[in-house]
Image (cartoon, grey):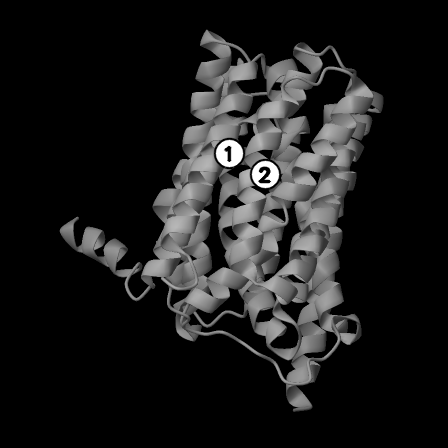
């Protein structure tokens, strides 16, 4: 047991202090974003919106995310990641607090668009900062540490959020979201100011190749859009499924979602270290992650036993553990041929675009054809993503042979 403990700690060695600070900032910020998993419940229960209304609101969420990611990439390449990150965090905090005072459908569409536009300028900047503060050999593990921070925050966030809803109201969540964003801003300014932080691997590409001509990247982009489309159902349609089909309370749902974050916190870093040493290609590992995530919906069709929810969550969790770090690492490697912010932006946009179509499509589908038929379609869509990754692997193999 002692050996396992020291081996676990050993997987964290070699990461820079700046990456640890960035992880802490991300943890504080992510702990507060407890509104998001409960947003569909808040809109249907507190504001009495229909599922169709919720679907369109989530599409506005996605459009804001796409625009914010694109803008964040452009600004990162022009003014640097530090300025983009602190401005994004500060204004997101203010906007989250204001969102609780919006009650009409049109106003909420506009409000959530603005929140996500500002919030998601942070993502390309954060990835660029991570790349700059990481040694080349530690980039995948640095990404994994950031994800551990995100998921540790996500583990605590929904559980605390469910408790806040039960004891107080949904309104309290917006205040917590806003305050934690401002706390993260304060920490960022004090520990990651350019004069205080070390640059370990800043990439300045001479004569960068345009991203539009990088065909393998765009196949990867489509696969990541599909992965995001499938994965994001866990944050919109799945909470409704838990409530409607299995009669779970908000607190129960928070605990189930929190289990996802806890498992990632415990197992992801050792798993990623082991997979890095296994010599499997990044593309194959992303494929396995997507396949497991798709199967997490397929198993729900087998039985109505409530334990199948845990099995589905386990499949999704391990699929997510594998797909996210290696997909991010793939983009970091690919960005060496072009502008760093641009590649990071389009990587973020693949998931932001999934927000536009994933939530809305899921809501419309469960409203029109029910949960089981929707899960069949979601599983089929994930299979298309697997085919894209198989195509990507073949093209990259030819690309390597021609070098």
* Residue to which mark 2 is pinned: 91
Tell which of 164 and 17 is nearer to you.
Answer: 17
Quarter holding the C terminus is bottom right
Q: Is residue 48 left or right of residue 266?
A: right
Q: Dot 1, how many residues are within 10 Å of its Cα: few (below 14), some (14-19), or many (20+)?
A: some
Left or right: where does residue 252 sit relative to residue 401? left
Residue 72 - label: none
Where's residue 371, x and y in %? Answer: 73, 25
Q: Residues within 10 Å of mark 2 (few under 14, many from 20)?
A: some
Q: Residue at x 39, y 58 (%)?
A: 19
Q: Secondary structure at mark 1?
A: helix
View extreme (top): residue: 167
- Which is more N-terminal, label 1 or label 2? 2
Query: Which quadrant of the view contains residue 269?
Result: bottom left
Q: Foreground mark, 2 or 1?
A: 2
Residue wearing tag 1: 311
The residue most toward the front is 195
Q: CA distance from mark 2 to mark 1?
A: 39 Å
Q: Between 365 and 347, which is closer to the camera in this rendering? A: 347
Relative to 193, does residue 249 appear above or below in the rendering?
above
Task: Please tell me which residue lies in front, 295 or 115.
Answer: 115
């Amino acid at each position: 047991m002692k050996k396992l403990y020291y081996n676990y700690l050993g997987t964290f060695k070699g990461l820079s202090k700046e990456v640890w600070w960035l992880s802490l900032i991300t943890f504080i910020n992510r702990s507060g974003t407890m509104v998001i998993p409960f947003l569909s419940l808040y809109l249907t229960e507190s504001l009495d919106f229909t599922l169709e209304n919720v679907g369109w609101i989530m599409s506005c969420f996605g459009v804001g995310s796409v625009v914010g990611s694109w803008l964040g990439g452009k600004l990162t390449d022009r003014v640097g990641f530090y300025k983009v990150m602190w401005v994004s965090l500060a204004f997101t905090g203010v906007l989250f607090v204001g969102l609780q005072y919006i009650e009409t459908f049109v106003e909420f569409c506009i409000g959530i668009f603005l929140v996500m536009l500002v919030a998601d300028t942070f993502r390309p900047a954060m990835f660029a900062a991570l790349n700059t503060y990481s040694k080349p050999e530690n980039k995948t593990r640095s990404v994994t540490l950031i994800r551990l921070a995100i998921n540790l925050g996500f583990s605590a966030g929904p559980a605390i959020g469910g408790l806040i809803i039960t004891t107080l109201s949904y309104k309290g969540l917006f205040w917590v979201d806003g305050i934690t964003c401002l706390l993260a801003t304060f920490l960022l300014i004090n520990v990651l100011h350019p004069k205080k932080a070390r640059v370990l691997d800043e990439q300045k590409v001479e004569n960068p190749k345009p991203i539009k001509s990088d065909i393998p990247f765009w196949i990867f982009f489509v696969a990541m859009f599909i992965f995001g489309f499938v994965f994001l159902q866990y944050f919109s349609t799945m909470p409704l499924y838990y409530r409607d089909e299995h009669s779970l309370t908000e607190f129960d749902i928070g605990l189930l979602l929190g289990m996802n974050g806890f498992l990632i916190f415990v197992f992801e870093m050792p798993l990623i270290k082991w997979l890095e040493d296994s010599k499997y290609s990044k593309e194959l590992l992303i494929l396995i992650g997507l396949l497991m995530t798709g199967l997490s919906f397929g198993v729900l069709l087998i039985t109505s036993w409530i334990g199948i929810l845990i099995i589905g969550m386990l499949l999704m969790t391990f699929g997510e553990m594998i797909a996210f770090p290696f997909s991010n690492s793939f983009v970091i490697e690919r960005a060496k041929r072009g502008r760093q912010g641009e590649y990071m932006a389009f990587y973020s946009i693949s998931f932001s675009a999934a927000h536009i179509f994933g939530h809305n499509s899921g809501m419309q589908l469960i409203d029109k054809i029910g949960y089981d038929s929707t899960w069949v379609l979601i599983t089929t869509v994930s299979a298309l993503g697997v085919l894209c990754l198989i195509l990507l692997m073949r093209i990259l193999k030819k690309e390597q042979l021609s070098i």
